[in-house]
Each structure stands twice: as C-alpha cells, then as structure tokens.
C-alpha cells in the first residue's frame, strides 16, 4: 500500500526552506552537486546533431579568440561616486524596452568593450544615479500582491539582535498555515503587510525567479548575457527602518535593481579574513556571526537608490541598508530585485579549481588539502583574486562560429583557463600549488580538471536557461499552473550536476553513490544566509560528521525525487522568439518542451 504523502503545502514549505534559497543564498552544502546531463549538451532538435560532440552558437572564428587576461586591479579604498557614463549607457540601451525587459541592459554591461567589465566586475562596487526606464516602477507592491494571489510563494522576514556580539542577520517565516487545505496554506498579501510593520520591516522572497513568470524573464535575460548561473531575490522594506539589513557579506556578485520607493545603501571594502579566521568571509554578519561597523573602513558607497537606479557589489563586500536617510517624505515601501551571479557556489573560481586539482593529484580516502596561501588571509586584494571567477561565461571569449565543435572550442578555452590559474597562484604566492605543478603528470591532471570544469559550466548554464524559459513561458503542464512546480525538477537536476563534479574530483572524499554526509567530508551545518537556510563553511567547521575539509563551494541540498534530463525548451506557439528568446537552441522551431514529472494531486 502506497504511504500517504504529506499535503502539498507542507511539502512546498519544506522544499522552500531547504532548497528554494539555494541559488542565491550564500550557502554551500556538501550533498548538492550535480551530474551533467547528456540531453543538455545534445538537444534532440539540434540541426547538426552529433551523438558524441555537441555544437555551440557563437559570434567569432576560433582563430580570433583572445587570450584570457590575468590583470586584476587592487581594491580601491577611495569613495565611489555615481558612474554617469555607465548610467547613460544603460539608459540608452533600455530605450524602447518594456518593463523588466533587461536583455539590452545586461548585454551593455557584459559587452567586451563595456566599461563595467574593465573597471568594476569582481573588483569594486558601482552605482548609477540615472533612472533606467524599464526598471522604474516595473515591479511594485501591487505587482507582488498579484503574484502572491496567483502563485504559491513563501517569504521570510529579516531580523537581528541589536548590540549583540554573537548574532547576525537571521530569517523568520512570514505567515502561518491556517489549515490543511491548499488555500489555507498559501501566503496572503495581508501576511506581508503585517510583516512590514515589524522591526526591521524587510520581507524577502528567495529565488523568486523560479516562482514568478515575469521575474523568470529577468533571470533568463541575465543568463543569456552573463552565461553564468544566476538567481533573483525580491526585497520589500517599510519606510522609516533605521536598519533594514545589518552589515553582512554575500557569496554572489550582486546587482541591486530598485523598482519602487527608496533605500539607502552603504558598501564597504572587505575586511581581512584573518581578523575572524573561523568565519566564512562570504557569510560575515549572518546567523551567529556579528559584523560590527567598527570593524570596517569608511564606506566606499553611501547612496540612496531611487526607482530605476542600479547598484553593483562584488561578492564578499560588506553592506548595510536603511530606509530613513533621505526618505523623510517617502510613503511607498522600498521594493528592489537582487540579481545574484553565482560563481562561488557552483565551483567556477580559481579557489575551487585549486581544490579539485589537488584532490585529483592525490586521490583516495587520505587526501587532504593544504590551507590557502597566507596572503589570502591577510590581504583583501589577494583574497578577492584567489576567489575570482575563472575566465568562463562573460569573461570567456565569444564562443566561435556555428561550425566549431565543443571539443575543439574546449581545448582553446582550456589553455586560457590554465594560464590564468597559474598566474593567479603566482600572484597570491601559493607555493604548494606551484611546486605540485612542477611534478611529472601534473600538467595533464590540471588539463583534465579544467576540461571537466568547462563541461560543468556549460551544463549548469544550460539547465538554468531551460528552467527560466519553462517558468517564463509556462511550457510544462503542472498542477494548478504553479511556477514553483515547474522549477523544482530543474533544481533537482542542478543538484545532480554539482554532486557529479564533487564525486569526480574526489571520489573517496566527495561522497559518491551510497556515501553518507560524514563520508562526504561536509562540515557541520549551521544556519545562516537569507531564510535561515543551512550553510557550510568552505574551509571546514565544527560539529557532527566532520571528517576532512570539504570542497568549496557547495550549494544547497535540494528536495529529492526523480531527476530529469531536459533539452532547452522553446517558447510556446504564438510567443515571439525575439527579442525575448533565451537562445537559438531555446527558440528553434520544433524544439520539445521539458518533460517535467507531474506532482501528486493536491
């Protein structure tokens, strides 16, 4: 007899608490790494199908791919002013665009000639004082209430203990189930309005790009432009909050897109990790860690964002917010979207490549990792450089013309990744890695790891693209037409893809099939990040199950169920493939929709 399943709303709440925060929370976690999907690389609708080697769309001949850059400017401590030239560029790019149509804005940010890439990306914060037309009033409190009524959404309320030395930002649930039925379990607009009246007055909708069709479009535009994993959170804050978020750091490179009301932001240079070596520098000021303003230098940015304005912050840069300064007459709540570009969580950084390389050099149950070089613990510049993104995605040269096969392109890209990795190890003084690179066979191992990471990156972005396409266009038939049920199988697919990378890099230490959490080398879970989700420190931690230093980074454990391997779906008939098409493979004629399993009846 089939066991009785929990009501849908209980399963949805459990899934949200454990996994919906995954892609934007600063939460690595040891079990959630995923196996690449052959169907993602070889979509059945590809015109030039090769069963072994997929093809990629691109823009320039293979011979013109530029070498990867190794230059990276040091962190500036000078106050940052609004970048008028960048603001003008983004305003011009968005002219004529519909609300929340950010395709051309993101393309302007990521173009090879973009001043943003040259001056700011993963180096320094920046903001615009001009209003981007497609952002101003593009998503308001009224829009969110409409989405709450249509979708099954869950929210958290940020809170913190003032004058506490042992507590940072935490998250409490908004709204309680009023009964066992679906309607009684749904979040209501009045629950959100009540939460906004409480101290801190900030309501957070995590990973909302996977739950609301209009916001999935923002994520889809970002994936296409950045060619990296992205996720979207939404924040609403009542006026008059002296601290809406205490000082903290994030694992993501963050774009704040203010759509309604006003909010003050202060952004600081990252403190040296050695000041608090037991705490993840990318999760300072969360859960049990308190990040005090006295620990930080004067702010690099101190500005009030209004509707249509944008702020960018690199990962690891502390920031705090309020809705008091400059807002005496403000009545509307502050509403902003936070787009997180994830490279740390998904293992696409120099630090992650270092770990995978060293594990592959010494496979087996006794494999251990040496500590990071001392410079990365004392010098913020070295720390940022050590954890910088590999030359993938927006830093990757244009993909080559349509006739170039992935196997050939991967060899060219791999040369650039290897060269930059070795340059970074020299810059930060990682003598252990430099010595190991001189060993016989080390070059072959490094090439093997880089090739595996290139496949991993391509698989991740394909799944993200397919997920946001499905949610935006409503491609999958799901119960009650709920967007969260469309995205859930893709999150499970991502879980498998990341786990496969860890199992491959360190089969004995990474878990593998049938391995428990203790054998996976995971540190003890602790609460932190947005939503109170469980986090794991990249350098290890205390508690049950600790065996050895875990690989960094590790995303969230997602809900378990049958996995799917899906091609990138096409927009439904009648939907224009341009300018909103996710990519040529997504919008190809005759493309098949993703085969998402049906949930049980509600």
Image: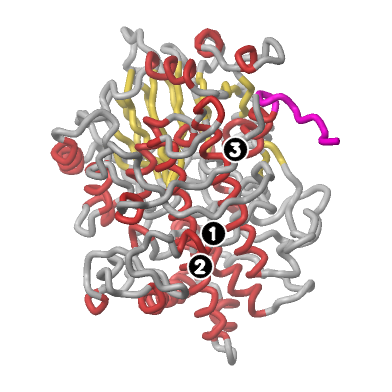
Q: Which mark is residue 453?
A: 2
Residue at (70% x, 55% y) in the render: 540
User: Of marks 1 and 2, which one's residue comes earlier in the chain?
Assistant: 1
Q: Is there any visible trace of residue 568 in the rendered image?
A: yes
Question: Distance from label 1 to label 2 (Cα)?
Answer: 8 Å
Q: Which mark is residue 58?
A: none
Secondary element at tag 1: loop
Name the spot of residue 40 as percent of width and height, x first: 47, 59
Residue at (68% x, 69% y) in the render: 506
Nearer the viewer's eye, disc 1 or disc 3? 3
Q: Which residue is mark 1?
A: 347
Question: Distance from label 1 to label 3 (Cα)?
Answer: 31 Å
Name the spot of residue 356 as percent of width and height, x first: 60, 69
Q: Which residue is mark 3?
A: 598
In-front residue for pair 221/74: 221
Name the spot of residue 281 as percent of width and height, x first: 57, 48
Q: Are marks 1 and 2 in contact (CB under 8 Å)?
A: yes
Q: Is there any visible trace of residue 283 in the rendered image?
A: no
Q: How is the image coloured?
A: secondary structure
Q: Which residues are magenta?
A: 1-10
Q: Quadrant of residue 127?
A: top left
| 10 Å crowding of disc 3: few (<14), some (14-19), many (20+) | few
Q: Is residue 21 left or right of residue 218?
A: right
Nearer the viewer's eye, disc 1 or disc 2? 2
């Amino acid at each position: 007899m089939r066991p009785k399943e929990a009501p849908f709303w209980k399963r949805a709440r459990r899934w949200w608490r454990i996994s919906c925060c995954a892609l934007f929370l600063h939460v690595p976690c040891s079990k959630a790494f995923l196996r690449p999907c052959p169907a993602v690389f070889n979509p059945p609708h590809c015109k030039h199908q090769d069963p072994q080697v997929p093809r990629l769309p691109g823009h320039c001949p293979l011979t013109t791919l530029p070498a990867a850059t190794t230059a990276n400017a040091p962190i500036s401590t000078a106050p940052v002013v609004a970048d008028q030239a960048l603001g003008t560029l983004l305003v011009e790019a968005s002219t004529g665009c519909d609300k929340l149509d950010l395709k051309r804005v993101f393309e302007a940010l990521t173009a090879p000639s973009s001043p943003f890439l040259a001056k700011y990306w993963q180096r320094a914060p920046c903001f615009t004082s001009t209003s981007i037309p497609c952002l101003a009033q593009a998503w308001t409190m009224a829009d969110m209430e409409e989405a709450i009524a249509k979708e099954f959404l869950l929210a958290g309320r940020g809170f913190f203990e003032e004058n506490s030395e042992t507590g940072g930002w935490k998250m409490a649930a908004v709204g309680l189930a009023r009964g066992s039925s679906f309607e009684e379990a749904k979040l209501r607009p009045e629950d959100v309005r009540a939460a906004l009246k409480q101290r801190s007055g900030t309501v957070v909708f995590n990973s909302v790009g996977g739950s609301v069709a209009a916001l999935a479009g923002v994520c889809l535009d970002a994936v296409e432009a950045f060619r990296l994993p992205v996720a979207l959170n939404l924040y609403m804050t009542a006026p008059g909050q002296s601290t809406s978020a205490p000082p903290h750091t994030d694992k993501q490179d963050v774009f704040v897109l203010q759509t309604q009301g006003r909010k003050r932001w202060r952004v600081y240079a990252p403190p040296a990790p050695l000041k608090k070596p037991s705490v993840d520098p990318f999760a300072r000021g969360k859960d049990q860690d308190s990040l005090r303003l006295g620990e930080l230098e004067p702010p690099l940015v101190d500005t009030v964002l209004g509707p249509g304005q944008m702020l960018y912050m690199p990962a690891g840069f502390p920031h705090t917010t309020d809705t008091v300064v400059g807002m005496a007459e403000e009545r509307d709540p502050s509403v902003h979207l936070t787009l997180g570009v994830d490279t740390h969580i998904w293992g696409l950084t120099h630090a992650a490549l270092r770990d995978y390389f060293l594990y592959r050099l010494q496979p087996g149950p006794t494999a251990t990792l040496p500590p990071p070089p001392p410079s990365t613990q004392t010098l913020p510049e070295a720390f940022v450089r050590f954890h910088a993104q590999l030359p993938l995605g927006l830093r990757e040269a244009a993909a080559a013309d349509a006739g170039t096969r992935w196997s050939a392109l991967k060899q060219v890209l791999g040369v650039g990744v290897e060269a930059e990795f070795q340059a970074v190890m020299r810059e930060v003084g990682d003598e252990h890695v430099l010595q190991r690179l001189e060993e016989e066979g080390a070059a072959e191992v490094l090439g093997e790891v880089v090739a595996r990471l290139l496949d991993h990156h391509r698989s991740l972005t394909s799944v993200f693209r397919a997920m946001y396409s499905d949610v935006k266009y409503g491609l999958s038939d799901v119960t009650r037409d709920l967007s969260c049920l469309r995205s859930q199988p893709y999150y499970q697919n991502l879980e498998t893809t990341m786990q496969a990378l860890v199992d491959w890099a360190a089969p004995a230490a990474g878990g593998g099939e049938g391995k428990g959490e203790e054998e996976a080398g995971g540190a003890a879970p602790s609460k932190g990040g947005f939503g109170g989700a469980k986090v794991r420190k990249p350098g290890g931690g205390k508690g049950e199950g600790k065996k050895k230093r875990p690989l960094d980074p590790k995303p969230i454990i997602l809900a378990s169920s049958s996995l799917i391997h899906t091609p990138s779906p096409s927009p439904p008939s009648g939907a224009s493939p341009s300018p909103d098409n996710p990519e040529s493979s997504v919008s190809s004629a005759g493309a098949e929709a993703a085969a998402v399993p049906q949930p049980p009846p509600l």
